[in-house]
């Protein structure tokens, strides 16, 4: 947040400098014109990027003397913030869903312009594949070898309850355009944002190995196992709730194919077929009901 405060100070210094110029202080016409243009687009990172090079050159060429405006030096010192800095917090589901959830919830509640990317591997991938609150029902992981009985936590739904945060769920290989759109919208949103990304993991034990990463992501979305959506509070109106479901059409039967290809599901099917069927059918029903609710 320190860089945000510094940039707010820079905006105030530029405004003060231009006011001093209006009162008779002298700076070059080129610098004055560039600063006025910058003030018009100060919240637009792309347009500020275009102006950054010419502005830095003009500031470097602007000589200072005892008669120079007092705020000119302050603007020169903060030229590294002519483009607003982009802040991203990146972590896995063990952090976001479990041990760091309280901190994540606090970040979203502050309303500050901070972006969060959650790489959801549906388990503690870095510490030995233990289950987390992102682990789906019916999957076997360490600490739940008999099949996870708990429903997967819906982190996106919790984030949307704040009503002040941009929230998206993406799967890069399933829909590149939707993923890029979500990142652009999150970056542009003037408040907290969170993107939850489906992240495949070797600990799942896919039959085709690591070459199946793309196939997994596509199947997860086509089956409704993983939703694609974007929620933008800026689009909320009396007739629009700001939510856009990007994978409206799903094929529920594709989830059976998805599970047959991953050892985390098939191991329970082999050791306790009836129990596996009960848990995994419940998971399918829950995901399908979630999709139908969001589709409305």
Image (cartoon, rainbow, N blue to C red):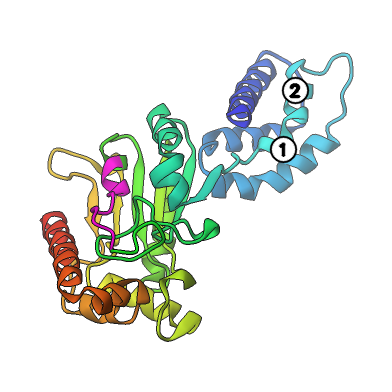
Above or below residue 68? Residue 206 is below
Give the SS element for disc 2.
helix
Q: Identify the residue at image location x=34%, y=50%.
A: 133
Determine whether, in the image, residue 39 is placed left or right of residue 64. left
Q: Residue 235: name its quadrant.
A: top left
Q: Identify the residue at image location x=26%, y=46%.
A: 157
Residue under pointer 2: 74
Which is more foreground, mark 2 or mark 1?
Answer: 1
Q: Specify the label residue 80 is tagged with.
A: 1
Q: Residue 70: name its quadrant.
A: top right
Which span of residues is magenta-colored? 147-158
Q: Is there any visible trace of residue 32 in the rendered image? A: yes
Q: Mark 2 vs mark 1: which is more N-terminal?
A: 2
- 237 in magenta: no
- Quarter that holds the N terminus: top right
Residue 134 appears at what percent x and percent y?
A: 35, 54
């Amino acid at each position: 947040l320190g860089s945000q405060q510094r940039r707010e100070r820079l905006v105030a210094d530029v405004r003060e400098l231009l006011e001093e110029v209006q009162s008779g202080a002298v700076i070059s016409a080129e610098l004055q014109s560039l600063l006025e243009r910058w003030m018009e687009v100060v919240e637009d990172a792309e347009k500020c990027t275009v102006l950054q090079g010419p502005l830095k050159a003009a500031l470097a060429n602007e000589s200072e003397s005892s008669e120079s405006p007092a705020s000119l030096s302050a603007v020169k010192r903060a030229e590294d913030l002519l483009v607003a800095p982009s802040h991203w917090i990146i972590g896995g589901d063990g952090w976001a869903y479990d041990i760091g959830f309280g901190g994540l919830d606090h970040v979203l509640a502050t309303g500050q312009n901070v972006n969060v990317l959650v790489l959801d591997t549906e388990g503690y991938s870095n510490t030995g594949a233990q289950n987390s609150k992102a682990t789906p029902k019916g999957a076997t992981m360490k600490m739940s070898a008999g099949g996870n009985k708990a429903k997967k936590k819906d982190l996106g739904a919790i984030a949307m309850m704040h009503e002040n945060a941009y929230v998206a769920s993406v799967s890069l290989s399933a829909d590149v355009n939707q993923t890029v759109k979500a990142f652009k919208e999150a970056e542009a949103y003037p408040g907290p944002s969170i993107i939850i990304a489906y992240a495949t993991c070797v600990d799942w034990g896919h039959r085709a190995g690591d070459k199946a990463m793309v196939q997994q992501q596509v199947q997860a979305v086509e089956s409704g196992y993983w939703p694609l959506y974007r929620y933008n509070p800026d689009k909320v109106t009396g007739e629009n709730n700001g939510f856009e479901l990007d994978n409206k059409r799903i094929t529920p039967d594709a989830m059976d194919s998805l599970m047959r290809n991953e050892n985390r599901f098939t191991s329970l099917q082999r050791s306790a077929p009836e129990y596996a069927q009960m848990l995994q059918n419940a998971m399918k029903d829950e995901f399908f009901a979630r999709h139908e609710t969001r589709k409305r």
